Amino acid sequence: MAVIQDVHGHDHGHDHPTGIMRWLTTTNHKDIGTMYLCFSLAMLFVGGFLAMGIRAELFMPGIQILEPEVFNSFTTLHGLIMVFGAVMPAWVGFANWQIPLMIGAPDMAFARLNNWSFWLLPVAALLLITSFFVPGGAAAGGWTFYPPLSTQGGMGTDMMLFAVHILGMSSIMGSINIITTILNMRAPGMTLMKMPMFVWTWLITAYLLVLVMPVLAGAVTMVLTDRNFGTSFFNAAGGGDPVMFQHIFWFFGHPEVYIMILPAFGVISEIIPTFSRKPLFGYSSMVYATASIALLSCFVWAHHMFTAGMPVVGQLFFQYATMLIAVPTGVKVFNWTATMWRGAMTFEVPMLFSIGFIFLFVIGGFSGVVCAIVPIDIQVQDTYYVIAHFHYVLVSGALFALFAGAYYWLPKWTGHMYDETLGKWHFWLSMIFFNVAFFVQHFLGLAGMPRRIPDYALQFADFNMISSIGAFGFGLTQLLFAYIVIKCVKGGEKAADKTWEGATTLEWTHLPSPAPYHSFEHPPVVK
Amino acid sequence: MSQGTGYYVPAPSKWPIIGSTALFFMGFGAAFTMSKLPLGYGMLITGLVILAFLIFGWFREVARESEAGKYKAQEDKSFRWSMGWFIFSEVMFFASFFGALFYMRVLSVPWLTDADQALLWPGYSGGWPTAGPGFDEKFTPMGAWGIPAINTLLLLTSGVTLTLAHWALKKNDRGALKLWLFATIALGITFLCFQIYEYAHAYSELNLKMTSGAYGSTFFMLTGFHGFHVTVGTIMLISIFFRCLSGHFKPEHHFGFEGVAWYWHFVDVVWLGLFIFVYLL
């Protein structure tokens, strides 16, 4: 790729406060990235705890552990915490660490705003978690908080709605920061079409966030005023419509799922070329495919509501638009495979997770096409088939790519190599337990088991027990990941500056490992 | 602390965590207030006071940095990009409420008059304005040609006076700058006063309330959020007015002024949408 002139600055990491004040007041993109990543890992375990509760209750038919109301709160908060607390902040953490390093910028464009974007998250998390302990318990209407359930819940629902407002603010500020950084802070010579794919995917993701997060804020505001000030947006008696909420929510919600997966595409597009020792196949088609996916994602929202009632013309439009998304996604999968074709491949942990990602994400993608077809969707709507589908794209998609990215960049972040053997254990255990947990849910869904219900008919018992065993195994395996990360931060084999011989981006070619506190004070020149 | 010779990266700052503290109090305070629990209002007001302190302090710091010459061409470009994207996010926020208005008028209200609904809501004839089939209280909709038309003129004029102020700033005519900026603020405040009067009129004489079904909900949500934005815009105008009095802004370097002007024009355009779709049609 580009030959790069080496003019990076030197480290002077002593000019910031120490102790807790360092983290509270920091304007350093690496500190903030670290906080985002630690926060999201903590939230992964909180959300994971809720998932374990759900699977424990579903281990056997009947009500054993969780009362139905509490079970509903668990599913609701599991979704909200995983989406808004674990996956999204983790990607913003990657963006914070990597974007300035990959484009040769000294920091993010707005360093103080960056700090605020992070420190809003603990406030929102506190609102969400403490809502379990208020009268009436946490929100229980599902993570999509459809009215009338969300216009009826107790105080916990208000707390959840305010938390979503705060998370939205954080996302909008973070996205504006990322867009500005990418558009205005690139090193001289780094044209848009020379940017690393991870940066491209984040540029498009941030655009989507600025586009749809305010719409979610509007939906949340309308639910709040319907609840507390007597408006009738979602009340048919007043001329409103609960289905209107679904339209507004999913106008946000569908781009939201691409917000969680596009940065994953970016990470995979960095890792596959590195470990195949070949440039990415079809770079420009990757950029256009990402942009097409983002564009299409704004016109498919109603495929989440085929059974909510809409004209057949609407169903057909949203069905075909949704199926169209498989085309740019297929381009991506083709390009990754073509990058590996005849490459000098090695299989370190980041590469294993990337290949696992492609393999399982494609399964999730195909079940997505299945769900897009109206007559089938009417059958599988609100069943475990849908649960299986979106866990294949979110867990073995977004989360596997997060693991891949973490193993890939941990040497650059910490200066130490992670434990390769333990990392391989983490991969294989995750791969096996994930499929044990979720593959059988396809069968449960096709057989008609409804989601969000704490009890089930006896014929579903065997598959549920298998699924729960897989889920417990998967949950325990993630403790191993936490151990590997802590071990890597504390010490280990010294990582080379260019840890991976096939890596070509600026952070590997221009910076030592660990990356100094201040990098690229004088921008490198990209030729 | 400027690092190297490049882009200005600010030193560690206490403002963000103060902002999060404000949001903490506001979030919990609002939730407590909605559930009528003790301490709710106290926390809410504490949060708002901290937020006001934060906004004042943070912007003052940025203004001082700007006057100290820390923002050069590249920083200026960052401000331009970010303000543009911020306004885009605001457009999408209003779009969600306009979308709700269109959905109700075009789809959900007519659907309620379908044969399907005849058993549930017998005799409901739909139409617009409506409070929906379940609300009996009669109300009078807000006419377009009284105060709203005057308000349209006020806001459009304020857009012109603000542009005149901007031209004066570019020509370094400080007297005219202050005059036109003052006129813009006066027009903004007059608009707000009329808006408050209109709300009082709606509640006391027209029986038009937030609880008046679909029409009341969309009317107060759209005009209310717009009024809130005008209030914020007026505060922004007042703050740059005082900055002008203190001799801030140069003919070639004044993004603080331009950012406020962009915001004000955005609020102006939203009003035109409101005037057409909420009042006129």
Image: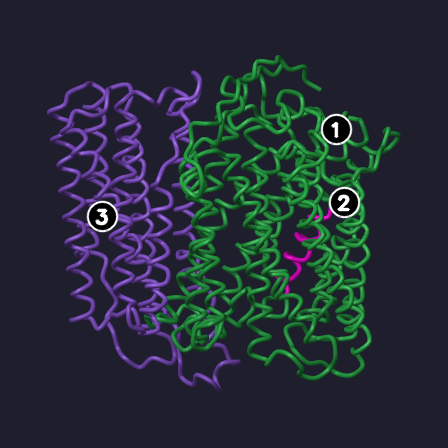
Chain colours: A green, B purple
Name the residue carrying label 2: A423
* Nearer to me, B42 or B274: B42
SS of the residue under disc 1 = loop
x, y percent for residue B38: 29, 72
Query: Which circle, 2 or 3, is nearer the viewer?
Result: 2
Q: Is residue B59 left or right of residue A190?
A: left
- Callout 3 amino acid: Thr
Taking the spot 57% from the left edge, 13% from the top edge, the residue there is: A7
Q: Quadrant of residue A16?
A: top left
The answer to whether the residues at label 2 and label 1 have Cβ atoms under 8 Å apart is: no
The answer to whether the residues at label 3 and label 1 have Cβ atoms under 8 Å apart is: no
| 10 Å crowding of disc 1: few (<14), some (14-19), many (20+) | some
Q: Is residue A291 left or right of residue B63?
A: right
Taking the spot 81% from the left edge, 31% from the top edge, the residue there is: A276
Query: Which circle, 3 or 1, is nearer the viewer?
Result: 1
Q: Quarter of the image for the N terminus of chain B: give it.
A: top left
Given the image, what chain letter belongs to the residue carrying mark 1?
A
- Above or below, A305 against A256 in this view is below
Name the residue carrying label 3: B152
- Above or below, B174 against A339 in this view is above
Taking the spot 50% from the left edge, 25% from the top edge, the residue there is: A106
The magenta stretch is: A312-326
* Nearer to me, A370 or A134: A134
Q: Is residue B32 left or right of residue A150?
A: left
SS of the residue under disc 2 = helix
